[in-house]
């Protein structure tokens, strides 16, 4: 991964965040804390900047928490997908064994008893040798 591609990802993320921010208003607790700070420091210059900085800081913190939560869930999903794949492989192998056994049983049932007896005696003779 080059530095240039990571910059593009950050820029697209920032663009999407701005787009979502325009569509979705800030949570009530952010707006409430912003209003409380304004009322406490009404006469001070730059209080709006401080409040905006604090809101942005909280927003970034929440965004980072969400990112880490999404990554954790993705790891769990990948692990469960691997388990599912392994289970499917076991099922396929057991199905193949079942089909083989069923074919063997059907073959034994299809032969007359005399042939089956002859095969078993031939098997016993081979065992003795």
Image (spheres, helix red, strand yellow):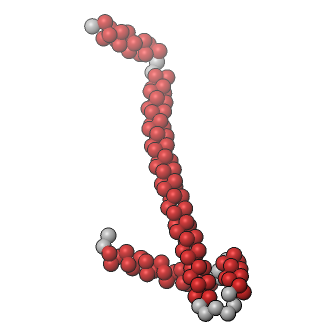
Question: What residue is shown at x 59% (from left), y 79% (from top)?
Answer: 54
Which quadrant of the figure contains the N terminus?
bottom left
For the residue pair 86 and 65, the one nearer the viewer reads as 65
Circle count = 0
Q: Examine the rendered structure and indicate whether residue 60 appears above or below residue 89.
A: below
Question: What residue is shown at x 30% (from left), y 11% (from top)?
Answer: 126
Mark yes or no: residue 35 visible.
Answer: no
Question: What residue is shown at x 46% (from left), y 39% (from top)?
Answer: 90
Q: Examine the rendered structure and indicate whether residue 58 appears above or below residue 44.
A: above
Mark yes or no: residue 114 visible.
Answer: yes
Image x and y of residue 100, in percent? 44, 32
Rendering quarter of residue 46: bottom right
Image x and y of residue 2, in percent? 30, 73
Image x and y of residue 32, in percent? 71, 80
Question: What residue is shown at x 62% (from left), y 88% (from top)?
Answer: 47
Which quadrant of the figure contains the C terminus?
top left
For the residue pair 119 and 42, the one nearer the viewer reads as 42
């Amino acid at each position: 991964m080059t530095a240039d591609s990571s910059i593009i990802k950050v820029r697209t993320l920032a663009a999407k965040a701005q787009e979502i921010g325009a569509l979705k208003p800030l949570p009530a607790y952010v707006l409430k804390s912003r209003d409380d700070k304004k009322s406490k420091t009404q006469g001070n210059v730059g209080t709006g900047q401080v409040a905006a900085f604090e809101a942005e800081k909280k927003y970034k913190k929440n965004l980072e928490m969400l990112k880490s939560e999404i990554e954790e869930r993705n790891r769990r999903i990948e692990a469960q997908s691997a388990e599912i794949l392994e289970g499917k492989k076991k099922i396929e192998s057991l199905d193949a064994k079942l089909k083989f056994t069923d074919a063997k049983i059907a073959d034994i049932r299809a032969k007359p008893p005399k042939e089956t007896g002859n095969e078993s005696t031939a098997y016993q003779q081979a065992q003795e040798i």
